[in-house]
Image (tube, rainbow, N blue to C red):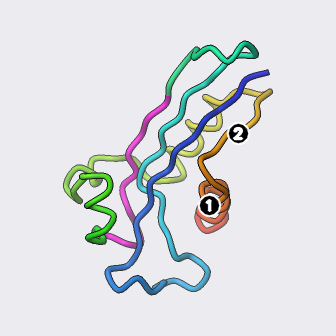
Amino acid sequence: MNYIVIDLEWNQSLTGEAEVDGFPFEIIEIGAVKLNQDREVTDTFHALICPQVYRNIHPRTNEIIHIDIEELQKGAPFPEVVERFLEWCGENYYFAIWGTADLMELQRNMEYYG
């Protein structure tokens, strides 16, 4: 059994209002560590995601993560990153999160991108 500790960063519209119904936040970065059953770090995962919906960085997002749009444009599309991430997680794991919002937004982004 592995534990996957994830930290997601996401962006939103410049107005703070969802421009796409039911999709208020777009994940732009996935970071994670993998812990074994003894809670020892065995691997890490990090990927930037090129935004497809909210292509301008909200000022608050920029203030928190200090990543500009030019750097994000070098990232891969969300479907590609999430596929790599889930493959990296393996078959037998539990997620550990900072708060319930990360898993909710991960699920919402996976649903949006099919």
Q: Residues within 10 Å of mark 1 (few under 14, many from 20)?
A: few
Label 2 secondary element: strand
Disc number at residue 95? 2
For the image, the number of numbered tags is 2
Residue 93 in the figure: left or right of residue 59: right
Image coordinates of residue 97 in percent, x first then y, are: 63, 45
Extent of the magenta region: 45-55
Residue located 80% across and 21% down the image: 1
Q: Is residue 64 above or below residue 13?
A: above
Q: Does the magenta stretch mainly form a helix, a strand or a loop?
A: loop
Above/below status of 86 relative to 34 = below
Magenta-colored stretch includes residue 16: no
Q: Quick check: 41 left or right of 19?
A: right
| Residue 50 against residue 16 in the figure, above or below | above
Amino acid type of the residue that numbered disc 1 sits on in the rendered structure: Ala
Residue sitting at x 56%, y 36%: 84
* Amino acid type at mark 2: Phe
Mark 1 highlights which residue? Answer: 101
